Amino acid sequence: LTRLARLLLLSGNTEAAADAWNKAAFAEPDKRDDRSLLEGVRCYIALGELDSAEAGVRMVLQSGSNLAMIREGRFLDCLIEAFRTGNVRSLSRLLDDGEYAGRMPAILYSLWKISGEETWQTRLRSEYPASPEARSLTADPPSISTASTPMWFLFSGREGIGAVPAPVPDQPPPVPRPLAPPPPVSAPAQRSTVIQVGVFGREANAKTLAERLTKAGFSPSITGRPVNGAIHFVVTVPPGDNINASLRRLKNAGFEAFPANK
């Protein structure tokens, strides 16, 4: 599953990669793989699906035991908050935390991209001139260019996955797609978690899966969700009192599933 997820990511199918990472995270009974879970979170951030990204991060921060993964979860949590609200205060605090020394170029780049303040770009250029993030700003011509997906450097191997060849001198450089401005800030809504079992382009396939789940003793629901201009049909079941127990029960019944927000 992890090899499939990497292949899907390299091929540009970020949504399918997110699904594969989440399946990998819960592939072993009683043993959640937080590394795979956070890889799925990165995909959701790149897709702009911040609710799904936050659900994965919360699981790691609330019940994770690996300190490195918890530290990574904190970084991603700050990014999600910054994208959702435009407030980069929590993200900027990581600059003073020695545990994130290896993340400094990515943090500075994020702060600049989200806030638009040139101070962060200046620090990135002067303090980390050899980093991929700083090299993407070099103008003579740029040695790499930022890919169109947001926060390209979130992915492992960002030197290759998030980079495109520099343009030849007699051609104009590609114009990066600007990040959309953050939506107006409103009072935070209460979110509830469900277990996602499948996503289909055809409603008939979603109904078939729902019927199988019903026969197995579950209570499935089908909802429509727009994806790239088309409606996809998402099959979910309630998490129950213990979401991990529900995931194990689904796994034992032959269904691959992962947590998601409504």
Image (cartoon, grey):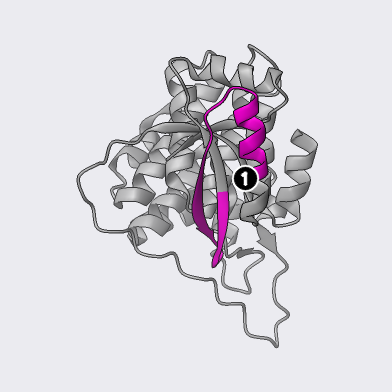
| Residue 237 percent across, percent down from the top left | 52, 31
Residue at far bottom of view: 170
Viewer-proximal residue among 138 and 176:
176
Q: Is residue 36 left or right of residue 178?
A: right
User: How many marks are shown on the rendered structure?
Assistant: 1
Q: Quadrant of the C terminus?
A: top left
Percent from the top left, x then y, of residue 122?
A: 41, 58
Residue 251 quadrant:
top right
Camera-side residue: 85 or 103?
Answer: 85
Occupied quadrant, residue 92? top left
Neighbourhood count class around disc 1 (C-alpha, 10 Å): few under 14, some 14–19, many 20 upward: some
* Residue span colored magenta: 208-233
Circle 1 — which element?
helix
Left or right side of 3 for 262:
left
Residue with the most extreme left position: 187
Instruction: Give the residue number, with chain letter if any, for mark 1.
Output: 207
Q: Is residue 194 above or below residue 80?
A: above
Decide whether residue 221 is among the magenta residues: yes
Picture layout, residue 193 above or below residue 232: above
Residue at image coords 73%, 68%? 165
> Could you tell me if residue 129 is visible in this image?
no
Identity of the residue drawn at 66% across and 39% down: 209
Q: Position of residue 135 (x, y in %)?
A: 59, 59
- Camera-side residue of 142 and 180: 180
Q: Nearer the viewer, residue 90 or 223?
A: 223
Q: Amino acid at mark 1?
A: Lys
Q: In the image, 58: left or right of 210?
A: left
